[in-house]
Amino acid sequence: MKNKMFYKIAGAIFAIFALGTAQADEWDMPTPYPDKTFHTQNIIQFAKDVEESTKGELKIKVHTAGSLFKHADIKNAVRGGQVPIGEFFLSLLSNENPVFGVDSQPFLATSYEDADKLWHAQKDVVSKLLDKQGLMILYSVPWPPQGLYVRKEISSVDDLKGVKFRAYNATLERLASQIGAAPTQVEVPDIPQAFATGHVEAMITSPSTGANSKAWDFVNHYYDIRAWLPKNVVVVNKRAFRRLDKSVQEAVLQAAAAAEKRGWEMSRQETTEQTKVLADNGMAVHEPTSSMLKEFQALGNQMIDYWVSEAGPEGREILNQYNAK
Ligand code: PCA
């Protein structure tokens, strides 16, 4: 009993001492996606870079696959200071303000060049909105172009009517409803289970998420429609960031810039590599027919009109900037 007390007091004294001298910090970092995901791998490298360049003054402990906070709660956990840093899917915030969701508008930006342009047009607006919530964007990386996974071959968008469709944000849910499919929100770690239990039968996502989820276990066809390139962001709580020594702040920013560059490169590589993984595992990888693409694009145009009407002047400004470049 006495012994226990001694350790408790010694521990408390040590903790106060450690705080007082602002020695090493350890940051918990929640992320939504499984370990194998290239975004997660990139974050693990980012954490290593920070630890190395600060000689251990700041350690970032990555908690993957929604294990520390559920995906939907990560932003608010960083905002509220429960954790100093975290990653989430940017367009999840489109229910707060549609400008967060411009990268998920179907057929607006469908190549890496256009995704980069769109990010430049969007960045100031979303940075300001997040700044008001006490958050700073460290970096952002896109997923590979989004393709369609289905059980049976399709020849037109009409063939998706009534199909139980996995969605990951409000825009995709809307798209699915427009098609006449039945959308359900499912997080990435739950995809295999959702298909196995028949909750969903089709999805639109990247070749990365398809391959990482072993899509061939539950669907046979992949249509490479390259509909949009949505992004993840890594944000930091501004107060937590300001508490770091200047040199540590600098190291975090440098590691973030490197992670952004590396992440975009990884994403491009994933596009070809993971599409090949789908084919190697027996999936039929199809180029969409031009009539199917036209149908999808028409839907995309309707969705963008709707988005503009919701996003107001800020949204229009983003599109003007995007189109000007
Ligand atoms: N994978 C994530 C987001 C976009 C992607 O390619 C998902 O399917 O939820």
Image (cartoon, helix red, strand yellow):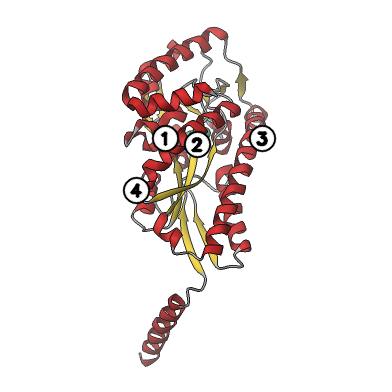
Q: SS class of the residue under badge 3? A: helix
Q: SS class of the residue under badge 4? A: loop
Q: CA distance from mark 3 to mark 1?
A: 23 Å
Q: SS class of the residue under badge 1? A: helix
- Mark nearest the camera among 4 and 2 is 4
Q: Is residue 149 left or right of residue 2?
A: right
Q: Report x, y in % for residue 259.
A: 59, 47
Q: Report x, y in % for residue 68.
A: 42, 55
Q: Earlier in the sequence, mark 3 or mark 1?
A: 1
Question: In this figure, which residue is indicated by the disc labeled 1?
Answer: 91
Question: In this figure, which residue is indicated by the disc labeled 3?
Answer: 269
Q: CA distance from mark 2 to mark 1?
A: 7 Å
Question: In this figure, which residue is indicated by the disc labeled 2?
Answer: 231
Question: In this figure, which residue is indicated by the disc labeled 4?
Answer: 133
Q: Earlier in the sequence, mark 2 or mark 3?
A: 2
- Mark nearest the camera among 3 and 1 is 1
Task: Say what amino acid the circle numbered 1 marks.
Answer: Ser
Task: Say what amino acid the circle numbered 4 marks.
Answer: Gln
Q: CA distance from mark 1 to mark 4?
A: 16 Å
Q: Earlier in the sequence, mark 1 or mark 4?
A: 1
103 in relation to 252, above or below: above
